Amino acid sequence: MADLYETLGVDRDASFDDIKKAYRKLARSYHPDVNPDPEMAEKFKEITAAYEVLSDPDKRQNYDVGGNGFGGFNNGGFGFSDIMDAFFGGGQQRGPRPRNRPGQDALIRVEVDLMEATFGCERDLNVETAITCNKCNGTGCANNSKPRTCDICKGRGETQQVARSILGQVMTSRPCASCQGFGSVISDPCGECAGDGRVRARKSIPIKIPAGVETGNRIQLSGQGEVGPGGGAAGDLYVEIIELPHDFIIREESNLHISISIPVTSAAVGTKVVIDTLDGKQEVEIKEGTQSGSTVVLRGLGVTRLRGSGRGDLIVHIQVLTPTKLNKEQSDLFKKIASIRNEGLDKVKINTNEEQGFFNKVKRAFR
């Protein structure tokens, strides 16, 4: 059996477009309508057979690992599959396989920011996929022609042969090499799709991304995948969400976390600060005596729950900034405050395990 890549004159790593271009170029030279020479007609059959295998991802993979492009292997002899055929009905008529076959599903990844993940958004996806050929409407035939019955298998889509094995002579069936198992041959293939009934093109697909999605979630768009060979039904398109990290907000399921730093004086006497959130600027009250590691919870300002109702919370983590450089006047003031509060400069308080566990929990939230 001739090498299919050599038959089309392409490299083994050739793309689908390269294979299609090579086939169309050769078809123009060897097509029976252009060159009536019987030898050229036979050459045209070989070219078409090679294209049928290499243009189909599954058949091509089978061929690349040593198969013949139809699920069997090129061992040139009588193998285990032949024995199975002989015992389990391999010699029985199975009929031609249809040219019209379902298309494959497709997967693309879409990046969204935290704002889009929280409130949802709409996008137009520009994807390259297989669509029905407009020139032949998916038939694969040019000039409103139709496939003709294969002269070799007479429309059965398979041929039978007698093979000798350790069990004696058995009758086996094989997909017809002339028509590739279809039972018919496209004598006048469409010049746009080269007989496949579909072409590669870019199209725009609108999609609504629901509120509450996160990395790993998938959205199924039925019938938006690749159109099948022969204009077959399209598969589904799956959109996988990739959520981009925010500059200063951390997401934990439906809750959001923000860390702010305040001066020690503000923590001591209390104050009000304004922070940026996904809902705009929000006022946060810092109570008198706030400790470093304390939190303030803003209810309902988190992420929308994808499979629930309402939104999570926004948790503000407070870090108290201790001044590192004091002038003499400032140092004297702090010493005076310590004296008034009867706080010795060498006074130490050992935190309990419960207190330490609380701070560790805060650290883990931001790790």
Image (spheres, helix red, strand yellow):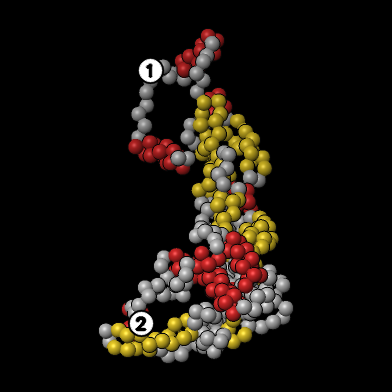
Identify which residue, 8 or 230, lies in the foreground.
Answer: 8
Packing grade of label 1 (10 A; few <14, some 14-19, many >=20) is few
Question: Would you say 346 lies left or right of 59 here?
Answer: left
Packing grade of label 2 (10 A; few <14, some 14-19, many >=20) is many
The answer to which image quadrant residue 357 occupies is top left
For mark 2, give the secondary structure.
helix
**Picture quarter with the C terminus:** top left
Q: Is residue 184 above or below residue 363?
A: below
Residue 223 visible in the snapshot: no
For mark 1, give the secondary structure.
loop
Identify which residue, 105 or 92, lies in the foreground.
Answer: 92
Q: Measure how far apart labels 1 and 2 are at the Cα level.
A: 92 Å
In percent of width and height, residue 153 lies at: 51, 87
Q: Is residue 297 above or below residue 330?
A: below
Residue 66 visible in the snapshot: yes
In the picture of the structure, the residue carrying the numbered disc 2 is: 82
Q: Could you tell me the amino acid type at mark 1?
A: Asp
Q: Which mark is residue 24?
A: none
In percent of width and height, residue 87 lies at: 33, 88
In percent of width and height, residue 321 lies at: 52, 26
Identify which residue, 310 or 198, lies in the foreground.
Answer: 198
At horizontal 63% and vertical 45% (from top left) the residue drawn is: 278
Q: Could you tell me the amino acid type at mark 2?
A: Asp
At horizontal 57% and vertical 42% (from top left) the residue drawn is: 246
